Image (cartoon, rainbow, N blue to C red):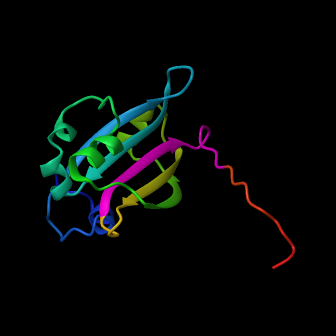
Amino acid sequence: MLTPPSHIAYALELVAGVRALHRARLVLADDSGPMSYVTAWFPPDIAEQCPRLAQAGPIAEGTTNYVRRQTARGPVRGTDVTTVRLATKQEAEHLGVKRPAAVAVVLHTAYDQDEKPLVCEEGFTPSGLWERIDNYPMNAEI
């Protein structure tokens, strides 16, 4: 358990200084090179009920299914905030890019049926690999 950065603590609705469970993973592109580096933060109540989250390596059933099975709480709503900035030294090392390098940062928070945060994930993707596609109706009639 670590003390999360203030923006993660805020997203998880934690009081300053409260520790959260931290997991990190490197997502590989088709060519096996780094595509994204993602850190997931779980509030203490989830961490206590889901001890496998503290173990290294992937969870075969996936973290969402594991958390749902252990807690009877599953995601019903998510909020994603996307920003773009220069990579930190550590992020550049994880992603295998030379600084200065722009990264897209997606902060994803999943909420349960009671609007309580289940997890906050922050993913960093080099600008050359990040793409967002939106499809939506453009109906002129209201």
Residue drawn at point x = 22 percent, y = 52 percent? 71
Q: Is residue 56 left or right of residue 77?
A: left
- Specify whether residue 100 is in view: no
Residue 103 position, x and y percent, is 52, 47
Compared to 30, does 38 lie above or below?
below
Determine which quarter of the picture holds residue 84: bottom right
Task: Work out which quarter of the rendered image holds the C terminus and state it.
Answer: bottom right
User: In the rendered structure, which segment of residues is drawn in magenta?
Assistant: 117-132
Q: Is residue 127 magenta?
A: yes
> As rendered, which of 107 and 97 lies closer to the eye?
107
Q: Is residue 36 left or right of residue 12?
A: right
Residue 7 position, x and y percent, is 33, 65
Residue drawn at point x = 23 percent, y = 46 percent? 22
Determine which quarter of the picture holds residue 92: top left
Q: Is residue 134 magenta?
A: no
Q: Is residue 123 left or right of residue 141?
A: left
> As rendered, which of 15 and 93 lies closer to the eye?
15
> As rendered, which of 113 and 45 lies closer to the eye?
113
Residue 58 position, x and y percent, is 30, 30
Residue drawn at point x = 68 percent, y = 49 percent? 133
- Specify whether residue 85 is in view: yes
Residue 31 position, x and y percent, is 56, 20
